[in-house]
Amino acid sequence: MTNHEGIGIRITGTGSYLPEKILSNKELEGMVDTTDEWIQTRTGIVERRIAADDQPSSALGALASLNALDAAGLTPEDIDLIIVATISPDKIFPNTACFVQKRIGASNATCFSVEAACSGFVYIMAIGAALIRTGLYSHALLVGAEKLSSIINWNDRSTCVLFGDGAGAVVLSACAPEDNTYLYSKLGSDGNYTDILHVPGGGSAIPFSADVLKNELHYLNMSGQEVFKLAVNTMVAAAVETMEAANVTKDDIRWLVPHQANTRIIHSVAKRLDMPLERAYINVDKYGNTSGATIPIALDEIVRNGLVSKGDYVLLVAFGGGLTWGANLIRW
Ligand code: UT7
């Protein structure tokens, strides 16, 4: 198929998987110098999930994927493209999508991963849609999968209270143009901020060594306040640009599905967009920040709880390390 004009795109299934183990704020009080009150007031987080030792990101992603395939009524062999968004890959290489492929038996898929941090899922949705539009792929499995507990410094109270493990997946399928529900994507990046949210060591810039270990450079490091300000500005700009490009207004949006990092960030974004807070989906209280997985997990909860109807506009918006940011607009 080479006819770009003749291809529509729609979401045919969503899925998610959250590890069983719950780590509460109260338990964190016994691990670092923090309080449940501080965490809830500053972030909105009450608890997060922690994956088992034998569950790397691909294991979480595979379970979310099987869930999404089931919802789509497809088998793993029907999938011809798997893209994983993760900053906690199973290994530096090969890419985590190949591990997901192996786990679910999607033998016909082309597989790669994208490291756009917390914007990872909005990035892979845009990439998946663009690849389907070429006519080369029919069913893309898009997976946000993170075992952030493996890159967190559990002695650093400024970060360890914020993150959690989990995975979400979406099946994006080619369809007739009149059934198209995928409206627009806006992505952006600014490499001037590469060191405000990063894992400093263990890559090719500072290869893994005893010094990396000693200086704890293999853990996630963040300048929280700087990230906070940029998060609000970039998410608002991406949301506005996306709505304008698709010719819809804030009043048309049924669900704003923001990256789940902090309820204060979500409240600020909704306020700046002049949208009622009830239309912003929030579940950061239950799972903390699962980076590339927050948006597909939220989307799956919205779908499974029957909170979205045909014709509703859903606006996904995220920001993350890089910096990266972006938005996708879907008409359900
Ligand atoms: O997905 C992208 C990833 N990241 C984010 O989106 C995070 C964006 N940033 C944030 O959400 C917020 O900046 C944080 C939640 C990380 C921090 O909140 P804040 O209101 O910006 O606090 P702060 O960094 O200004 O720290 C305030 C105080 C400090 O003490 P002093 O210097 O005022 O005495 C911190 O040392 O809170 C202290 N603090 C803590 N206290 C208790 C920092 N972490 C903790 C903690 N428990 N866990």
Image (cartoon, helix red, strand yellow):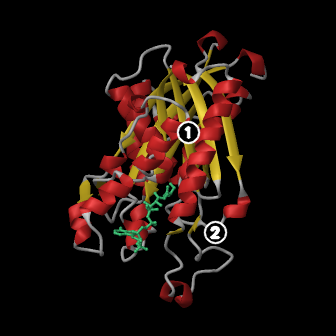
Q: CA distance from mark 2 to mark 1?
A: 22 Å
Of the two numbered discs 2 and 1 on the same chain, state the one appearing first in sequence. 2
Residue 143 position (above or below residue 221):
above
Which residue is more in the foreground, 285 or 132?
285
Query: Is residue 129 visible to the viewer in this orientation of the structure?
Result: no
Q: Which residue is mark 2?
A: 195
Label number found at residue 317: 1
Residue at x 48% of width, y 18% of height: 312
Residue at x 26% of width, y 66% of height: 35
Instruction: Say which quadrant the N terminus sits in.
Output: top right
Instruction: Tell me: 297 left or right of 243.
Output: left
Ligand 1 under 8 Å from disc 1 Cβ: no
Which residue is more in the foreground, 255 or 178?
255
Residue at x 61% of width, y 17% of height: 180
- Mark 2 lies on a secondary structure that is loop
Quadrant of the rendered image containing residue 23? bottom left
Q: Amino acid at mark 2?
A: Asp
